[in-house]
Each structure stands twice: as structure tokens, then as C-alpha cells.
Image (cartoon, grey):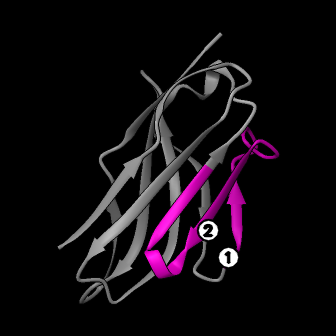
Amino acid sequence: QVQLVESGGGLVQAGGSLRLSCAASGSIFSINAMGWYRQAPGKQRELVATITSGGSTNYADSVKGRFTISRDNAKNTVYLQMNSLKPEDTAVYYCSGTIVVDIQRIYWGQGTQVTVSS
């Protein structure tokens, strides 16, 4: 069984920073892409950023230049450094991982709340 556990969410003022972490654990053979998604109240879940096992990254236009995704393959952990936060960044942030146990599947964390006050 695989678990993704996020941490680092919270309440911050506009212009502030937060760093999210997501650690994968369990009977993992390998991890391919990892990513962060978010869902604001009344809206669909949307991509924030992804990173491949080789370190190639992709960002939503709304966060480019403000957010940075990174990973530590030895720790099976992905990070999201969020700077210059805006109230519109308020959402539940979910970690995802494309993980091979017996077969390749996409796993999700439980989500962590990020609230940016104006």
C-alpha cells in the first residue's frame, strides 16, 4: 500500500511564503512524475506544477515565477515552495505521484489547506 502525506499548509498574509512537502511511503518500486494540484471552493481541481523523475518541471501560468517544485528522490518527497502568495492561491493543495508498485498507478494525498489573507 502506498501513502502520500502532505504537510506545510496554513494561513499566511498576501505576499508571504509557504513550503509544502509530500512524502510517499509504502511498497514502492519506483516513482515517475510527481505533482501538486489545488482545488478552491466551488472550482475544479487544477494543475499547479509537475516534476519528472529526471527533474523536468511544468507550471500553471498562474504560478510561474512565484512557485517552485522540487523533489528528493532518495526521500520519495516532493516540495512546493510558494512565494508572493495571493488570495487567489487559497485552496486545498493535493500531492500526486505516478508510482510503480506492481503496476503503475496515480496516487493522491489527502490534501492540505492553504489560506492567503488579503
**Is residue 44 or residue 8 the one in the foreground?**
8
Please tell me which residue is depicted at 70% across the width and 66% down the height of the picture. 57
Q: Is residue 72 left or right of residue 105?
A: right
* Residue 59 is a magenta residue: yes
Q: Residue 12: give x, y in percent of width and height.
A: 58, 22
> What x and y, as percent, mark residue 36?
52, 52
Q: Amino acid at mark 1?
A: Gly
Residue 34 vertical placement versus 45 (above, below): below
Q: Residue at x 65, y 9 (%)?
A: 118
Residue 94 lies, in percent from the top left, at 42, 47
Helix, strand or loop at mark 1: loop
Residue 2 to residue 83: above or below:
below
Is residue 37 part of the magenta span, yes or no?
Answer: no
Q: Dot 1, how many residues are within 10 Å of its Cα: few (below 14), some (14-19), or many (20+)?
A: some
The quarter of the picture where the N terminus appears is: bottom left
Do the residues under discs 2 and 1 have CB atoms within 8 angstroms?
yes
Name the residue that disc number 1 marks.
55
Q: What residue is at 72 percent from the left and 41 percent from the top?
A: 63
Q: Which residue is mark 2?
A: 51
The answer to whether 55 appears left or right of 7 in the picture is right
Q: Is residue 4 above or below residue 71?
A: above
- The residue at 45%/75% (across/down) is 75
**Outermost right residue:** 65
